Amino acid sequence: MKNSGMEGQAGVELNKQDARLPVKKAPKRERQKKESRAALYLVAPAMILIFIVAVWPVLQSFYYSLFDLRLSDPKKSEVHLKYSVDLGRYLDNYPFLISSIDSEIKKGNDAAELQDIKEKLQSLDEKLQKDPKVKSQYNAVNDKLMNFKQPSEDIRFADVEKSTAEEFSKTTESVSSQLNKAAKKTEFTQEKKLLGLASGMKDSIIKPTFIGLKHYKEDLTEPRMWRALGNTLTFTVISVAAELVLGLAIALLINKAFFGRGLIRASILIPWAIPTAVSAMMWSFLYDGQNGIVAKLFESVGIVDKMSNLLTTSTGAMFSVIFTDVWKTTPYMSLLLLAGLQTIPSSLYEAASIDGAGKWKQFTNVTLPLLKSSILVALLFRTLDAFRVFDLIYVLTGGGPANSTETISILAYKVMFSQTNFGEGSALSVIVFLCVAVISMLFIKFLGRDLLNDGNGAGR
Amino acid sequence: MRKKANPFFYLFLVVFVFFVMFPFLWMLLSSIKPLSELFGDKAFTPFSSHPTFQSYVSVFVDYPFMRYLWNSAVVSTITTVYTVIVASFAAYAIARLQFKGKTFILGIVLSVSMFPQIATISPIYIFLKNIGLTNSYLGLIIPYTTFALPLSIWLLVTFYRKIPGDLEEAAKMDGATLMQTYWKVIMPLAVPGMFTTAILVFIAAWNEFLFALTINTDTNYKTVPVGIAMFQGQFTIPWGEISAATVVVTVPLVIMVLIFQRRIVSGLTSGSVKE
């Protein structure tokens, strides 16, 4: 860079002055220390924000992906690492179950069996209350319920040992089945109530939702996931390749002085600037099977047999999505490449043509090597964008027909927000993240450290 | 020094511009057609025989489109202003000051800008839901930081680096403190760069779809891209209104692009081209 030399000189002169006036300035090391401390203060807010809104969520996504997390199921709507008892639910059932059993015993309905059940339940209850912490929560929840109040979340759930929890499940299961069996033999006065309370008891234990890497195992053997990944790759490779070739061709063509550059630049920027969702909506009108002008044009050119096939067949839909992406991003690609082209000094071309190199030779020996880093940077950002594609497909095809344009981001979104399965959805989104990380690492290997060191050469 | 353009070249330009602009032109023409001409045979005739503004009226009367525009404007403006301010400090330190771990920090900024949004959405959604920020402006401004902040830092670093260093040295020699140097010397020179950054961040925030779709599901808080995408009715698709809405969104953008094209281009290409 140009200023590097100038800055160096200024630095030298500054040092000379320092030597002459040693009193005025703090020693250099001191100043540098101060500078780096100031720099940290300046950088800190941005880094903290980035950590909170981007790094932490990605880690959290990974964490969630290890759990069976479903927002629609109250027992699985949160991350549970330990076994716990929902005391609210338990105390809504247990006392009433005991008293119903008592009243049945009084009436003499299968008293022996019921007595046995009652003892089982009471010993379970005693065991539960043995733990002093559980006992205090137990009493607090009981008080609230007695006064017809809802117990708060933090006292409602009591952590218990795994063994206690297992015993709890076993006992409640057996009680419930014993009662069912007994009900078949004898006629209870309040049969429905009895059975309802017994089965309600079963639901008051909460198992940990931690399932380890199960979601990943399932996803990796799931054909739908592989299909979505395949669709994503097809979309990415074809659209980025087309955009690169067309973009480069356009950049080479318009890399000259001509009248109306501003107009060209503006028309290049407009498709890039409008929201993808809006342009997808626009194209879904143009592709419409009955009234779409572009669908009609495609039909008359012979790209599709019938204009209604465009969005209803799998190849037609994929083609439409890629075509729209190419329309929207090729101009942008050519803009990036044009900027790269303009940094190549024309003297190189003059030298090449003096040496007798033809147009093609000039392109392969001068343009391409010098444009390499521009091309790679443009490719990197475009590939990542294409791989993460969401809004275009969500609005244009919704992933259809028959999931033929469903990309991995769309699949993750559907699993999370349509099936409310956040555990599996998070696992899918972690897979997207890992793919993106691999792609960018490959590119950065090609790019070397150019990207980061870009301006570090600017003097210091 | 450069090759001269010939008539064929201009022909190519016309074809190129036509191809790029055709969808917009068609939307513009469709937006002034009466409903009967949007379907059937007349759907393919470009010029309407009975032009009408009915679709435009309907967009603002039958749909809360004004509300969408307002929501988008509020969310994008606040996001832009606050991220550019936070980013300008960080970018100044990265571009102009010496400290350890600079490359590392720049690496983090770059990798975060590559994060797929879908990988952050489930924790962000659950968090915002738990603290009751879904269906609010803040509920979008917070997640928008994920892409707006790295983008602003990245762009501003390249702009700050272009400012000649001797001015800063001179200020230091005159005994200016670091903050004085920043406010009195660097800032005035960085304003154009900050402005360019602001334009690009604003466009990015205005166009965002996934967070807006999932976090603000209430009509009162929907943004323009989500609003337009949700225009489709249960059984019929109101193409007239959709084309009118598209035109309403596109026209200000076209004007903005025409005015700021140089800045936008310099911003878009600054990260990718070594000078």
Image: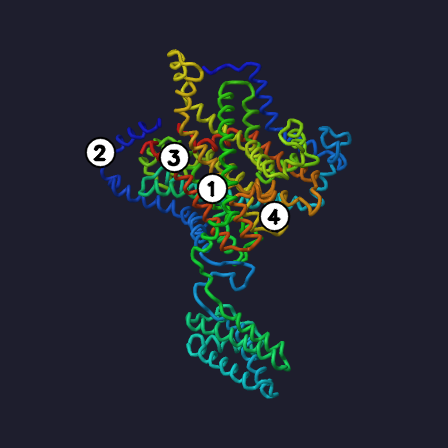
Badges 2 and 4, same chain: no
- The kind of secondary structure element at disc 4 is loop
- Other residues around mark 3 within 10 Å, as few (<14) / some (14–19) / many (≥20): some
Which of discs 1 and 4 lies nearer the camera? The answer is 4
Are the residues at dot 2 and dot 4 in contact (C-beta closer than 8 Å)? no
On the rendered structure, is A125 left or right of A391?
Answer: left
**Chain for disc number 3:** A
- What numbered label is drawn on residue B84? 1
Q: Position of residue A336 (x, y in %)?
A: 47, 29
Which circle marks residue B222 in the picture?
A: 4
Residue A211 in view (yes/no): yes
Dot 4 alpha-carbon crowd within 10 angstroms: few under 14, some 14 to 19, many 20 or more: many
The verdict on a common chain for dots 2 and 1 is no
Where's residue A397, x and y in %? 60, 41
Q: Is residue B26 left or right of residue B122?
A: right
Q: CA distance from mark 4 to mark 3?
A: 37 Å
- A250 w.r.t. A380: above or below: above
Cα distance, mark 2 to mark 1? 41 Å
Q: How is the image coloured?
A: rainbow
Amino acid residing under circle 2: Arg
Judge the density around disc 1: few (<14), some (14-19), many (≥20) Cα neighbours within 10 Å: many
Callout 3 amino acid: Leu
**Residue holding disc 2:** A20
Point out residue B81 in the picture as x, y percentages from the top left corner.
50, 43
Q: Which mark is residue A451?
A: 3
Q: Residue furthest front?
A: A185
In terms of sequence position, does the residue under pointer 3 or pointer 2 come before the other? 2
